[in-house]
Image: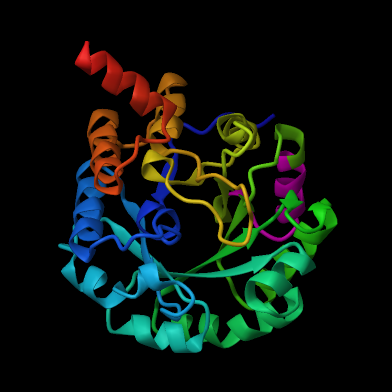
Amino acid sequence: MNKLPARVKLVDVGPRDGLQNEKQPVPAAVKIDLVHRLQAAGLTEIEVTSYVSPKWVPQMADNHEVMQGIQRRAGVRYSVLTPNLKGFEAALADRPDEIVVFGAASEAFSQKNINCSIAESIERFAPVVAAAKAKGIAVRGAMSCTVGCPYEGEVPPSRVDYLAGLMKGIGVEHVGVADTIGVGTPKKVQAAFEATFKHYGVDQVSGHFHDTYGQAVGNTLAALEMGVWQFDASVAGLGGCPYAKGATGNVATEDVVYLLHGMGIDTGIDLDALIDAGAYISQQLGRPTNSRVARAVLAKRQG
């Protein structure tokens, strides 16, 4: 076991990954306000929006309005998802600090999600990565279904090894190991990281866990024990996956921060302010927060 990290960096993916599947339109002003609340709480990495066809993801049709409406804070990195060169070119006007490309460790998921094989999906992203690097924009790769797939079932580490190698081959600088449908348990998650470490150092790898089976916090701890110090999380546990029926939201940022602070690991995040941000977006969506920590704290506040 590696020594636990003294500090952890969290990327809040709530504004993008969290809100993309909402059926009712979320006003751009609310999304902008959420980003402002997150950065005020101390988040320095925020995944804001994506540049996909509004036909496929109507919730992200306001990407320009949101990105241009944010009051940028020094030291905060704003990232966006770009599924292809057209999306990347559309994003350029909004000056993202980082772009996110994606690939699945499952062939079936890749076909269902973007209608092509894993290898073909990475070929599509090669010119996007090259264009971003030419502009000095950082590139992060999201590796989905690294432990389980809704169509194939269990995904072996060899598939993660394959995908990480392809990502490295096109110049992706950092990859996220994602348990997209939330079926992972600590040993399976650690095996996925071990496969990734064949291609990337621990400083270029992050964890991205969903909480479908209530394992996300345990999986976070399992990754920490391997020295992983960067994680995605979603305020109020927002999110899901349109191609993974029954998959619940990302692990709540509040729950991860509570875990880390309880272990003496620094995040730079004010938990109370973060809980307020989660309460705000939950209220706007008209439902309770998915964060267990936030629910407990809010109940205690009400006395």
The vertical placement of 88 against 298, above or below, is below
Name the main secondary structure of what is drawn in magenta.
Answer: helix
In this image, 250 relative to 300: left or right? Answer: right
Residue closer to the observer: 184 or 206: 184
The residue sitting at 31% across, 73% down in the picture is 63
Q: Residue 228: within the magenta?
A: no
The residue sitting at 30% across, 39% down in the picture is 278
- Residue pushed farthest top? 303
Residue closer to the observer: 106 or 269: 106
Q: Residue 193: within the magenta?
A: yes
Whether residue 187 appears in this view of the structure is yes
Whether residue 134 appears in this view of the structure is no
Total labels: the figure holds: 0
Instruction: Give the position of the C terminus as an image quadrant.
Output: top left
The x and y percentages for residue 224 are 58, 34
The x and y percentages for residue 228 are 58, 42
Instruction: Give the position of the N terminus as an image quadrant.
Output: top right
The x and y percentages for residue 133 are 47, 80
Residue closer to the observer: 239 or 131: 239
The vertical placement of 9 against 86, above or below, is above
Q: Which residues are magenta?
A: 189-202
The residue sitting at 31% across, 37% down in the picture is 268
What sort of colour scheme is used for the picture? rainbow
**Which corner quadrant of the image does residue 64 belong to?**
bottom left
